[in-house]
């Protein structure tokens, strides 16, 4: 019993952490928190089920299609909801524009895909065991994303340019960095990570349009607790959140788990709006 | 003498204008009232349900409008309060936990519960910025639905509970409609009262110009807290009515779609308007009924609408309806201050003594922005503060205003130490200020902007303003008269009815001064008031500043225009790198060798 709680807790925590990283990657490039982060996760599950289970596309190809779709939604977010309002002095506009886009995608999914949760296909044809693929897939995805981001930011020119933009947009632009392309690339990258989170966690979360607001909220909790733009903080906070939620679910039931998570979230935000771990200007990754 | 009577005439005329123009804005509401009352004559039963629903929604949206439209807080999860109100009313009326209560009593209790939760959801808004607050309300909405689903013994879980049934005469379809319509009309009236009160203006100031709100003595926590209480209460009442209308409620009835509908109704209507969001609510409730195939797509379309509005018409319906403010303004309008009005505006000022800085030190990291500064601003004198960029002039203003806590030294008002960080309390001490970049509520009229400056002089409580009781009306008349005088003093009374975002830069600067004058300040801090003004305007500004000092106010003038400084100041302090380079009379400064070399370039 303990084993399954820990496994599912860590797995769910990995999904939250990945959505948190999605928020962070978009935030680093534009100082914008986008409501589409959870929507990307939802789409990862729904499109995976659509491509693989319903249309019968091979798993590997379907996986690539899902990631591509995530990248496209990321770029669309940048073009439609972020770029037009970035210059505006009115800080709240991006909240509304990304919310609108997230709702458009979510509602479209609800209408075209249906409002019921549908099963997500099993990706590998192996027997169910204790340490099942539905648990290790999100963990693997999370580890892969962390390692790749680390390599990207540390060892590639593009990654360094991302960091430069995140650190100081104006200075980066003055240096001649193509700020707009880098921002679009960041959004595409965020889209891939978000879709990957939903795809890897598809079996646990199912292909369900209602996952969008849930992931938008629970995926933001790690960001808020871990410090905005801080991916390490997001991973740690995401894992803790997942473990706490699953444990509380099992011990005292769902109501308490949700209320407790919400209360902790609000209290931490009120006490330390910059997050438990560090400041807004900490290095990313 | 003649000028004074002219000012009197002007303010009288403003009165007349204001009283005749109250009919104009009220006209659409009267039309809606007549349509609403006579509705049963036109439509069949189904339209009664739709109309009732529109009324119920508006009861909630009217309160939410104060939060979103006026205070500018992005509360997207307000459906949580509808849910809470619906369940509280239904459960109490059905007697799931206690003996069944009368539906009216249950509704009243729901209002109290809603007010408390409105405050709880709202409190984070005091510390959290836009996105954080939005997501907090979203999280709350998610959790309330989960609790409703899981707490089976009380809420019936997925099976639900029956909604309360109101006794005769409100049990029939149209009877219940009139009940809801009455409440909707009441909410319209109450929120319109608040909107046109000092509370409504203070909310828009918090939304668009928070620092100016603080400088005018507006306490954000107290005001937002009150508004959240009110908004939560009406939302919960709407929930109770919603439960009756549905006749049976399950958690499924309270989707986020509803929240989005409420929120978008306000944005479509336009921020800072009552009529716009009212029309928006009616429109969004009724539209899907005209096109049945669209019902499934309605939330999708709302979302598209939201995106279009944000990107294309941020002003919403209210801006489209605001035809008055599309008439072009005269292009060659001059600002002609009338300093003689100041005596009437200020009345007898008591001598406030002096505002002093003693050995103030403030550093940011390793940079000493202010390094041991002494300063004394006496009443009825103009004290000039000059120095190159980065010499600590604005920082000094911000220390006096309480934005920074000095590491050493003190700011004293007449001997008593000023509390650090209690920024909105500066206004009570009659310390007013303007800002380097004018902080103005663009969507409000010039008059309303100036009236914000007098917020602390009103006496009516929020509840009195809701119900438009005599003290509220007296406040409004007093503030309007004072504001017209202040506008006359700075020379902008002809523009009083114009939307502030249509003014030129120089006019905004004088508007800010008028707003500061509303406090009848003992001390007035002006942060580069001449920046961006023409030479002629600078001359008039100088005369105005001198007149303000003659009326008894101590003025601290931070400026780059040396001519203005030497013309109007009694005493000048020159700063360099946070330290005092020189201090003395204009004549002494003009001949100070170091100052001339370093700064005046003589």
Image (tube, coloured by chain):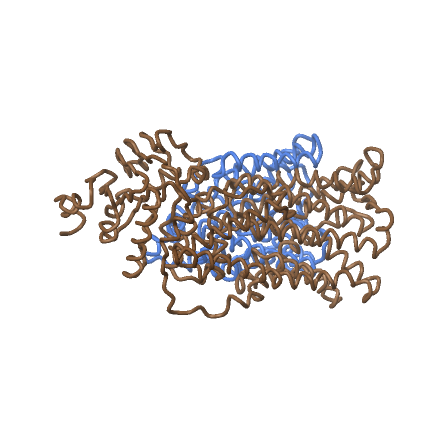
- Asked if one can make out residue A199 in the rendered structure from this viewpoint, the answer is no
Residue B42 rendering spot, x and y as whole percentages:
81, 67
At x 39%, y 32%, the residue is B418
Q: Quadrant of residue B159?
A: top right
Residue B256 in the figure: left or right of residue B202: right
Nearer to me, B52 or B400: B400
Q: Closest to the observer: B328 or B106?
A: B328
Give the brown chain's letter.
Answer: B
Q: Residue at x 51, y 34 (%)?
A: A271
Q: Chain A rendered in what hue?
A: blue
The quadrant in which the N terminus of chain B is found is bottom left
- Residue B287 is drawn in which quadrant? bottom right
Q: How many marks do you count on the picture? A: 0
Q: Picture coordinates of residue B388 (x, y %)?
A: 23, 47
Q: Is residue B108 toward the left or the right of residue B449 in the image?
A: right
In the rendered view, tell whether residue A126 sits above or below residue A71.
above
Residue B460 position within the rendered picture, expressed as x and y whole percent measured from the top left: 58, 42
């Amino acid at each position: 019993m303990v084993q399954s709680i820990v496994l599912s807790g860590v797995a769910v925590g990995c999904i939250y952490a990945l959505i948190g990283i999605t928020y962070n990657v978009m935030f680093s490039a534009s100082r914008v928190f986008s409501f589409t982060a959870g929507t990307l996760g939802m789409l990862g599950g729904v499109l995976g089920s659509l491509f693989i289970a319903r249309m019968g596309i091979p798993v590997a190809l379907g996986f690539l299609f899902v990631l591509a779709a995530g990248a496209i939604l990321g770029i669309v977010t940048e073009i439609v909801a972020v770029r037009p309002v970035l210059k505006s002095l009115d800080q709240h506009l991006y909240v509304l524009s990304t919310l609108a886009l997230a709702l458009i995608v979510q509602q479209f999914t609800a209408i075209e895909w249906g409002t019921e949760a549908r099963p997500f296909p099993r990706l590998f044809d192996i027997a169910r065991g204790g340490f099942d693929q539905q648990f290790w897939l999100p963990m693997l995805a999370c580890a892969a994303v962390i390692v790749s981001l680390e390599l990207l930011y540390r060892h590639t020119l593009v990654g360094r340019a991302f960091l430069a933009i995140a650190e100081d947009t104006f200075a980066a632009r003055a240096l001649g960095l193509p700020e707009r392309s880098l921002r679009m690339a960041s959004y595409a990258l965020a889209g891939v990570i978000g879709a990957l989170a939903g795809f890897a966690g598809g079996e646990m979360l199912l292909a369900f349009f209602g996952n969008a607001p849930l992931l938008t909220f629970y995926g933001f909790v790690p960001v808020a607790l871990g410090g905005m733009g801080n991916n390490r903080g997001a991973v740690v906070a995401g894992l803790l959140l997942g473990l706490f939620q699953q444990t509380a679910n099992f011990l005292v039931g769902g109501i308490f788990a949700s209320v407790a998570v919400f209360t902790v979230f609000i209290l931490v935000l009120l006490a330390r709006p910059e997050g438990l771990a560090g400041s807004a200007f900490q290095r990313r990754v | 003498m003649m000028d004074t009577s002219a000012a009197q005439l002007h303010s009288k005329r403003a009165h007349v204008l204001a009283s005749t123009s109250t009919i104009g804005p009220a006209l659409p509401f009267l039309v809606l009232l007549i349509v609403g009352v006579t509705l049963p004559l036109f439509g069949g039963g189904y339209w009664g349900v739709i109309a009732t629903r529109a009324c119920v929604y508006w009861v909630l949206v009217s309160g939410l409008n104060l939060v979103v439209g006026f205070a500018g807080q992005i509360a997207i999860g307000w459906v949580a309060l509808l849910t809470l109100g619906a369940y509280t009313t239904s459960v109490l009326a059905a007697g799931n936990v206690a003996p069944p209560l009368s539906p009216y009593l249950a509704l009243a209790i729901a209002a109290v519960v809603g007010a408390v939760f409105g405050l709880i959801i709202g409190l984070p808004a005091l510390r959290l910025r836009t996105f954080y607050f939005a997501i907090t309300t979203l999280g709350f909405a998610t959790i309330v639905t989960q609790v409703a689903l899981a707490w089976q013994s009380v809420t019936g879980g997925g099976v639900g509970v029956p909604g309360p049934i109101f006794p005769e005469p409100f049990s029939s379809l149209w009877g219940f409609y009139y009940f809801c319509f009455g409440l909707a009309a009441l909410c319209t009236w109450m929120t319109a009262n608040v909107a046109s009160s000092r509370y409504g203006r203070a909310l828009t100031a918090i939304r668009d110009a928070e620092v100016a709100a603080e400088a005018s003595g507006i306490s954000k926590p107290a005001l937002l807290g009150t508004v959240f209480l009110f908004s939560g209460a009406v939302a919960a009442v709407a929930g109770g009515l919603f439960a009756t209308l549905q006749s049976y409620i399950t958690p499924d009835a309270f989707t986020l779609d509803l929240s989005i509908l409420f929120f978008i109704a306000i944005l479509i209507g336009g921020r800072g308007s009552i009529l716009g969001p009212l029309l928006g609510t009616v429109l969004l409730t009724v539209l899907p009924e005209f096109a049945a195939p669209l019902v499934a797509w309605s939330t999708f379309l709302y979302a598209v609408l939201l995106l279009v509005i944000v990107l294309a018409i941020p002003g919403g319906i209210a801006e489209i309806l605001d035809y008055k403010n599309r008439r072009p303004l005269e292009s060659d309008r001059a600002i002609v201050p009338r300093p003689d009005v100041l005596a009437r505006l200020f009345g007898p000022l008591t001598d406030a003594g002096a505002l002093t800085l003693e050995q103030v030190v403030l550093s940011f990291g390793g940079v000493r922005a202010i390094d041991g500064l002494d300063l004394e601003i006496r009443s009825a004198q103009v004290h000039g503060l000059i120095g190159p960029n980065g010499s600590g002039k604005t920082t000094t203003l911000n220390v006096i205003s309480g934005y920074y806590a000095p590491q050493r030294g003190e700011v004293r008002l007449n001997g008593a130490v000023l509390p650090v960080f209690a920024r909105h309390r500066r206004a009570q001490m009659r310390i007013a200020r303007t800002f380097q970049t004018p902080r103005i509520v663009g969507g409000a009229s010039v008059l309303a902007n100036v009236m914000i400056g007098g917020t602390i002089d009103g006496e009516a409580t929020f509840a009195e303003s809701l119900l438009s009781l005599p003290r509220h009306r007296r406040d409004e008349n007093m503030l309007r008269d004072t504001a017209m005088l202040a506008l006359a003093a700075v020379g902008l009374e002809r523009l009083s009815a114009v939307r502030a975002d249509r003014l030129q830069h120089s006019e905004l600067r004088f508007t800010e001064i008028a707003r500061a004058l509303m406090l009848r300040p003992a001390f007035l801090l002006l942060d580069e008031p001449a920046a961006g003004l023409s030479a002629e305007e600078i001359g008039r500004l100088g005369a105005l500043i001198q007149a303000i000092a003659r009326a008894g106010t101590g003025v601290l003038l931070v400026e780059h225009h040396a001519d203005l400084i030497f013309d109007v100041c009694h005493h000048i302090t020159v700063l360099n790198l946070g330290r005092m380079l020189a201090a003395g009379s204009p004549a002494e400064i003009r001949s100070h060798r170091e100052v001339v070399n370093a700064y005046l370039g003589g």
